[in-house]
Amino acid sequence: MGRTKEDHVDRILAQWRRERPELDVEPMGIFGRLKRLTTHIGREVDAVLLKYGLSSSAFDVLATLRRSGFPYRLSPGELLGMTMVSSGTMTNRIDQLEKAGFVERLFNPEDRRSVLIALTEKGLATVEEAVGAHVANQQRLTCNLTAEDKADLDRLLRKFLSEFE
Amino acid sequence: MGRTKEDHVDRILAQWRRERPELDVEPMGIFGRLKRLTTHIGREVDAVLLKYGLSSSAFDVLATLRRSGFPYRLSPGELLGMTMVSSGTMTNRIDQLEKAGFVERLFNPEDRRSVLIALTEKGLATVEEAVGAHVANQQRLTCNLTAEDKADLDRLLRKFLSEFE
DNA sequence: ACTTTTTATCTTGACGTCAAGATACCTGCT
DNA sequence: AGCAGGTATCTTGACGTCAAGATAAAAAGT
C-alpha cells in the first residue's frame, strides 16, 4: 500500500503526539509544511535573482513597475498597495534601487507631496531578463507536480488565502 | 457556474499576460499565493504568541525543547538540525531566551565544546500554555477548509516539499 | 484667509536573519 | 606525546523588515 515516506514534519508531529496526545496536530502539519516549503522556495528564487544582481525584495519592486505597463512609473503609495510591506520598507527598497541605478525618482509638479518611481533603461533591461529566468525557475520547481496537482494546489491555496484578503 | 472571485494574485497574473503574453504564469500564481498566505499566517501566529511574551522564533526553540521530551534539554547543534536557521541565528535566539529566563545553558562536563540548552520552570510553563493556544489558533485558521480540503492540501504540500528535503 | 484634518513620503531605532570567520575543544594518526 | 584535522559554538558586520512618528503639502471646514 504505497505508504508515503516519513518526512521532517511527520517526525515533529510524532513527538507532539507522544508528549501532548490530546492536541489535534493535523493543522500543525499543514502549517509546518507551508513554512518549510516557503523557506526552500525562497532560497531557490534568491539564487536565480542573484545572477541579475537582485534580491527578491528588489525584484518585487522592479517587477511591479514593469507589469504596470508603459511608461513603467508608479508612486511609492501605489507600490505600497501592491506589495504587503510597510512604508519604511518601501522607502528603503526604493533608496537601494535608486542607488543601484535601477529606478529614479521623478517629482510630480502637480502634487509636491508625491513622487513617481520610474524604471531606468538599466532597470527595464534587467527586469526583462530577470523575469524570464524567474518564470523558468518557477516552472523547474513545479515540474514534479502533475498538471492536476498544480490545479488542485492552486485552487486550495486560493480558497485558504481568501480567508485573509 | 460558481466562478471564483478574482483575487490579488489574479490581478498580478492578468498584468503579466498583457505585458508579456509569452510567459506561462501558472506556476507564478501558485508561488504568489503561497507567499501571501505565509505572510498572513505569520501575522496571525505572531499575534497569539505575543500574548505569552514570545516571538515565533522564540516559540520555535521552546517548542522544540518541549517536544523532545523530559528533561527538555538539547544541545545548540541539535536545535540547529531541527530548525532551518543558521548557527549565528540559533546563538542569538538562545541568548534572548536565556536573558528572558526561559532557558538556561548547562555545561557538559564530558565535552567542554558543547553545552545543553534546558527549559527552565518558567520556560516549560510558558510553552505548555502557548502551544495549546497556538494549536487552537491553527484550528481556527483552517476551519473554513473542509476535512477533504485539509487532507488534499497536506498531501500536495508534502509532495511539493519532498522535492527539497 | 486661516486653521484643521488628511494624505504622501521619509526617518529612526530596534529586531531577526545570514554568511563568514573566530575560538575552543576533541579525536585520531603518527 | 604531539600535531592535524574535525567538531561545537559563538562573534561580527551587513541587510531587510517593521512600528511609530516626523515632515511636508494638499484639501476641507469655518
Image (cartoon, coloured by chain):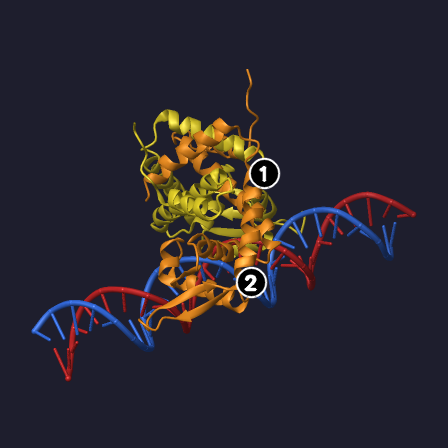
Chain colours: A orange, B yellow, C red, D blue
Amino acid type, callout 2: Lys
Amino acid type, callout 1: Arg
Please provide percent x and percent y for residue B21: 48, 43
Please provide percent x and percent y for residue A68: 42, 54
Residue at mark 1: A140
- Badge 1 sits on which subunit? A
Q: Are marks 2 and 1 in contact (CB under 8 Å)?
A: no
Q: Which of these two is toward me, B113 or B163?
A: B163
B136 to A87, vertically: above or below? above
Report, in whole angstroms, how far the alpha carbon at label 2 lies from the one at label 1.
27 Å
The quarter of the picture where the C terminus of chain B appears is top right
Residue lying at 34% horizontally and 31% vertically, measured from the top left: B145
Q: Which mark is residue A122?
A: 2
A165 to A154, vertically: above or below? below
Q: Do labels 2 and 1 share a chain?
A: yes
Q: How many labels does the image show?
A: 2
